Image: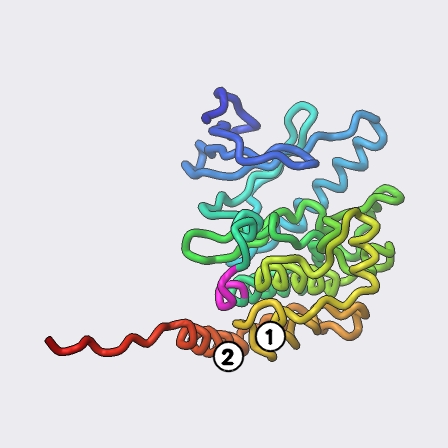
């Protein structure tokens, strides 16, 4: 349903795309460049001092993310301020969130590996520029109609050397996809994104998250202490090599994980042929061989 005519800065609002904890995302038109954009609005806190700090952090993060230009990262075009909200205008992607795709069940193994490799390549590019996403999850990965995976919402990504601190005790990110060191509140580096991507890949391959529980405390305990079964134990189309890749991405100790996202992407790409061969073998086993027709 089309939203009533309204505007944010020079952008004309066309409709609402979704709502989150931090604000609303709209589809909008940029009349200056005649293109459709997505606009994420974030409501600012009421306290004047906190508001100034909040806005400073937002602009710093938006500026850092706005410098990213990669096929697997949603491009940020503009930032602005309107009333009690700050907003970020970004690339509009025709496609589906990975979260929505996973709600239908596990993905084809080849598609899951391809999406994860694309995300790893986008993260490697951001990490090389000092930006850690900190909230890699299916809801922040858009899959276009052509199969391109794009990382969204670097809104909580921060420069590693940022001079703007988060509020004490503020937990950034989605707990189910967080790395153990993130849950403990320890220092973070790009390897926390590698762990989160490992969780996403596991869920895409099996249709179930590697760490689950009845409540948040149980999920956190599982992430810190439990070792999930390999994806191949839940999906026969996952080859042993892919099990090893997922296990390395999900290592509890950051030092035991991939040293960087580029190395993870390279292993996923090298595994694609084996995944395809495994799928072909499984399809052959599933195919019923019918006897030739009897002669009249």
Magenta span: 107-112
- Residue depicted at x 67% and y 50%: 64
For residue 92, above or below residue 107: above
The one of 210 and 175 positioned closer to us in this rendering: 210
Q: Position of residue 110 (x, y in %)?
A: 49, 68
Q: Are marks 2 and 1 in contact (CB under 8 Å)?
A: yes
Q: Which mark is residue 242?
A: 1
- List the residue tagged with mark 2: 274
Q: Position of residue 121 (x, y in %)?
A: 58, 65
Helix, strand or loop for the magenta stretch, by majority: helix
Identify which residue, 122 or 145, lies in the foreground.
Answer: 145
Question: Around disc 1, counting alpha carbons within 10 Å, would you say few (fewer than 14), some (14 to 19), or many (20 or more)?
Answer: many
Residue 188 found in image quarter: bottom right
Against 75, residue 273 (above or below) is below
Closest to the observer, 222 or 17: 222
Residue 47 lies, in percent from the top left, at 83, 26
Q: Residue 289 lies in magenta, yes or no?
A: no
Residue 106 seen in the current view: yes
Residue at the farthest left position: 296
Q: Is residue 89 left or right of residue 22?
A: left
């Amino acid at each position: 349903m089309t939203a009533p005519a309204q505007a944010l800065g020079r952008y004309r609002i066309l409709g609402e795309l979704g709502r989150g904890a931090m604000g609303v995302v709209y589809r909008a038109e940029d009349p200056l460049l005649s293109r459709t954009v997505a606009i994420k609005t974030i409501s600012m806190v009421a306290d004047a001092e906190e508001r100034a700090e909040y806005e400073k952090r937002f602009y710093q993060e938006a500026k850092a993310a706005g410098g990213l230009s990669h096929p697997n990262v949603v491009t940020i075009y503009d930032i602005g301020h309107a009333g009690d909200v700050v907003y970020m205008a970004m690339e509009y992607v025709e496609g589906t969130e990975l979260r929505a795709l996973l709600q239908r069940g596990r993905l084809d193994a080849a598609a899951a590996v391809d999406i994860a490799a694309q995300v790893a390549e986008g993260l490697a590019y951001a990490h090389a520029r000092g930006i850690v996403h900190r909230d890699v999850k299916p809801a922040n990965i858009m899959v276009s109609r052509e199969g391109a995976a794009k990382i969204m919402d670097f809104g909580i990504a921060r420069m590693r050397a940022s001079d703007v601190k988060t509020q004490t005790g503020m937990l950034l990110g989605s707990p189910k996809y967080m790395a153990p060191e993130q849950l403990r509140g320890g220092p973070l580096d790009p390897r926390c994104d590698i762990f989160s991507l490992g969780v996403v890949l596991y869920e895409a391959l099996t249709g179930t998250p590697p760490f689950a529980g009845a409540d948040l405390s149980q999920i956190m305990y599982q992430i810190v202490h439990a070792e999930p079964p390999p994806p191949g134990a839940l999906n026969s189309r996952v080859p042993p090599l892919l099990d090893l890749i997922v296990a390395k991405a999900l290592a509890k100790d950051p030092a035991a994980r991939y040293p960087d996202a580029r190395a993870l992407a390279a292993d996923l790409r090298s595994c694609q042929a084996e995944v395809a061969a495994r799928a072909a073998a499984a399809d052959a086993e599933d195919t019923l061989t019918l006897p030739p027709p009897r002669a009249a």
